[in-house]
Image (cartoon, helix red, strand yellow):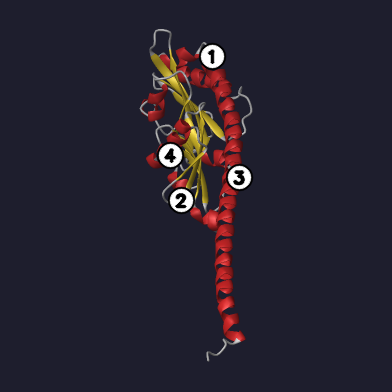
Amino acid sequence: MKSLKSPKSILYKLLIPILTATFLLLIFSAATLSVIYARQTEQSAIRSNLEILRQTDASMQVVHSHVSQILANIVQKPYLADILSEPMDNIQDEWRGRHQIGALFSDNPYAMIDYEILVFGANGFAVSSGVGAPILTSEEIMELPVFKKSLETSKIVYDSRIRGISSSTADSAVILGCRSLTKQDGSVYGGVIISIRESSLRKFYQNFINQSTSILLLSSDGTVLSSNILKDVGTHDTILLEYAQINRAEGDAYTRTEAKEFILSQYISYCDAYIISRITPAVLHR
């Protein structure tokens, strides 16, 4: 006669699948919650950084407006062509030219940035509004990439240098806004450069960043005009430029890279540049 199974053995057989199913359900739930949390964290970081880009764009528009007003105030003066193209044969001519240009420097709108004005001519004349004199000759300034690019357009052209072009900015990274000056016959007689300390521009976004997020202003040729990582200013980053161009072409606000970084970008037409926010995985999964 077969013996009946004990109640304990039956209970064990029932508990084992129940416990197994419960355990698997807990693992599945934890994994699901982890994915949901990660996505929410990512979206929160993206939203906050998009807002930073919008605020930075608004500040940049104000800066560009100030630069445009300053340049327009200078280039419209009818006597500027004579000062910058006519030979200066003696000290009196140079003093007169400096006096007239000095009057232009004092008659400009207030700007929310730390800037200097540099006026230079084909006749070798060069003068700065700052406390320091230009450390480059007029000929050397006209060989700068920013001036050469300005010859190709009537718009303001921006570029950056890790060192300034006047003695007061020689140890500071600067952003240069340049406008070339031409006569009606097309001949070039000089130019005007607004030299902005990069640190003055960086203050618009510096307070919003952390160790895992970087923000930079990247020109359309890949030059880093401004960045919270100072050593990057003046360098070229073609990889970030490519991501920014893809975002712009596809109408997207951001791209996720193979390294699981998020590259957020916004094109600013008035500077022909991109404001970029780079979010690393550390900020998303900490």
For residue 260, which numbered disc appears in the image? 2
Q: Earlier in the sequence, mark 1 or mark 3?
A: 3
Return the residue found at the far front: 1
Q: Which dot marks residue 144?
A: none
User: Mark 1 falls on what kind of element?
Assistant: loop
Which label was assigned to residue 76? 1
- Residue drawn at 57 percent across, 84 percent down: 9
At label 2, counting other C-alpha atoms closer than 10 Å, the crowd grade (few under 14, some 14-19, many 20 or more) is few
Q: Which residue is mark 3?
A: 48
Residue 243 has which mark? 4
- Frontmost residue, 286 versus 153: 286
Q: Who comes first in sequence, dot 4 or dot 2?
A: 4
Q: Position of residue 104 (x, y in %)?
A: 57, 21
| Dot 3 alpha-carbon crowd within 10 angstroms: few under 14, some 14 to 19, many 20 or more | few
Q: Residue at x 61, y 45 (%)?
A: 48
| Residue contact at pointers 1 and 3, CB within 8 angstroms | no
**Which corner quadrant of the image does residue 23 belong to?**
bottom right
Report the side of 81 relative to 112 (left or right): left
- Counting residues from the start of the chain, the first of labels 1 and 2 encountered is 1
Amino acid on which disc 4 is placed: Tyr
Residue 80 visible from this viewpoint: yes
Where in the figure is residue 5, as x and y percent of width and height?
57, 86
Check disc 3 and report its element: helix, strand or loop.
helix
Do the CB atoms of the residues marked 4 and 2 lie less than 8 Å apart?
no
Q: From mark 3 to mark 2, how far is it between C-alphas? A: 18 Å
Measured Cα–Cα span from mark 1 to mark 3: 42 Å
Outermost residue toward the bottom? Answer: 1
The residue mark sitting in front, 4 or 2, is 2
